[in-house]
């Protein structure tokens, strides 16, 4: 997909940095708005991008995010350096979370992040090496304009 | 209903975003879980919450919410109010509990 990319942008996400959390997904939303992507798709992309960004902020040390736009759709790829995920199937379950009490008190870590990403995207691929990091690819089709 | 009319009717205090009070409010969402708000709130909603840390502003902006109402007279963190002012986003405060302000707002927006 990268080969035929019309637009490809790279962002750096810092882990454990709650003061900057959400800035990358806000930037992605602004870029998609400027490009005139349908609002229904931007809404879903923004939700998934925010959840993915927060996962890096909460759990990883740092990550590289690539936003890639082709006529077919939008792909967001995130590769982080961090603890990784031991059991991806379990992490995908709604309500499962390994968040600390401190993170939960802030209203994060409800175990909704990955399920929210799956729900709002058209394709999602996740792989992880425990102790090394996690890779996440999320795709949003531009041929299908969904309701809301 | 315009945000400024809601503020007047329900005796809510605007801590920031005073130039955004002409916004049209379509509904509201009450929750303290950020993922829940991200998933389920709608554009032009008011968000009723007790969360007062700075990340609520990013969530609200991302979802195009009309404003955030902090309940139980909770004072926002300094970074939160700074961010809200910098972005000219309506951060609001009420003495009422989440239950009470949700009920009043529901009546105002939907009920008779």
Image (cartoon, grey):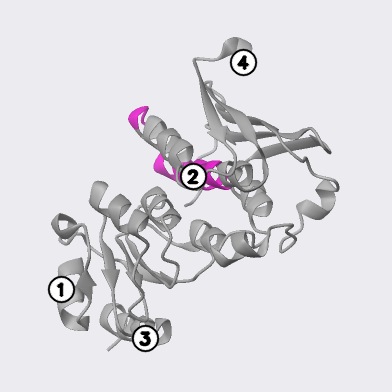
The Cα–Cα distance between marks 2 and 1, rounded to whole angstroms, is: 32 Å
A121 drawn magenta: no
Q: Which residue is mark 1?
A: B5
Q: Identify the residue shown where x is 41% and y is 34%.
A: A27
Stretch of the chain drawn in magenta: A34-51
Q: Secondary structure at mark 2?
A: loop
> Which disc, if any, is residue B103?
3
Earlier sequence position, callout 4 versus callout 2: 4
Q: Is residue B80 above or below residue B15?
A: above
Do the residues at discs 4 and 1 belong to one chain?
Answer: no
The Cα–Cα distance between marks 3 and 2, rounded to whole angstroms, is: 32 Å
The Cα–Cα distance between marks 4 and 2, rounded to whole angstroms, is: 27 Å
| Chain hosting mark 4 | A
Does residue A120 show up?
A: yes
- Residue A68 picture location, percent across and down: 55, 23
Q: Front-most of A115 and A19? A: A19
| Chain hosting mark 3 | B
Q: Secondary structure at mark 4?
A: helix
Do the residues at discs 3 and 2 belong to one chain?
Answer: no
Q: Is residue B87 left or right of residue B70?
A: left
> Which disc, if any, is residue A21?
2
Q: Front-most of A3 and B38? A: B38
Q: Quadrant of residue B104?
A: bottom left
Secondary structure mostly seen in magenta is helix
Q: Furthest-front residue in view?
A: B78
- Residue A74 picture location, percent across and down: 54, 29
Camera-side mark, 4 or 2: 2
Q: Secondary structure at mark 1?
A: helix
> Which disc, if any, is residue B60?
none
Do the residues at discs 3 and 4 belong to one chain?
Answer: no
């Amino acid at each position: 997909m990268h080969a035929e990319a019309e637009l490809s942008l790279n962002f750096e996400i810092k882990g454990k940095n709650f003061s900057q959390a959400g800035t990358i997904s806000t930037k992605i939303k602004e870029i998609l708005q400027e490009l005139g992507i349908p609002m229904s798709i931007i809404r879903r992309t923004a939700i998934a991008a925010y959840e993915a960004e927060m996962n890096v902020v909460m759990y990883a040390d740092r990550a590289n995010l690539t936003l890639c736009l082709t006529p077919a759709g939008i792909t967001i790829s995130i590769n982080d350096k961090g603890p990784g995920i031991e059991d991806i199937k379990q992490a995908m379950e709604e309500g499962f979370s390994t968040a600390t009490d401190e993170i939960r008190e802030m209203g994060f870590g409800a175990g909704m992040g990955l399920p929210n990403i799956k729900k709002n995207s058209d394709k999602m691929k996740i792989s992880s090496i425990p102790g090394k990091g996690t890779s996440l690819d999320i795709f949003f089709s531009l041929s299908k304009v969904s309701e809301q | 209903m315009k945000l400024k009319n809601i503020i007047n009717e329900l005796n809510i205090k605007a801590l920031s975003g005073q130039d955004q009070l002409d916004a049209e409010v379509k509904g509201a969402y009450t929750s303290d879980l950020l993922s829940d708000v991200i998933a389920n709130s709608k554009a032009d909603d008011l968000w009723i919450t007790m969360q007062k840390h700075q990340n609520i502003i990013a969530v609200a902006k991302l979802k195009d919410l009309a404003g955030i109402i902090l309940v139980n007279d909770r004072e926002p963190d300094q970074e939160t109010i700074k961010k809200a002012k910098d972005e000219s986003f309506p951060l609001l405060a009420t003495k009422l509990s989440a239950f009470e302000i949700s009920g009043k707002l529901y009546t105002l927006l939907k009920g008779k």
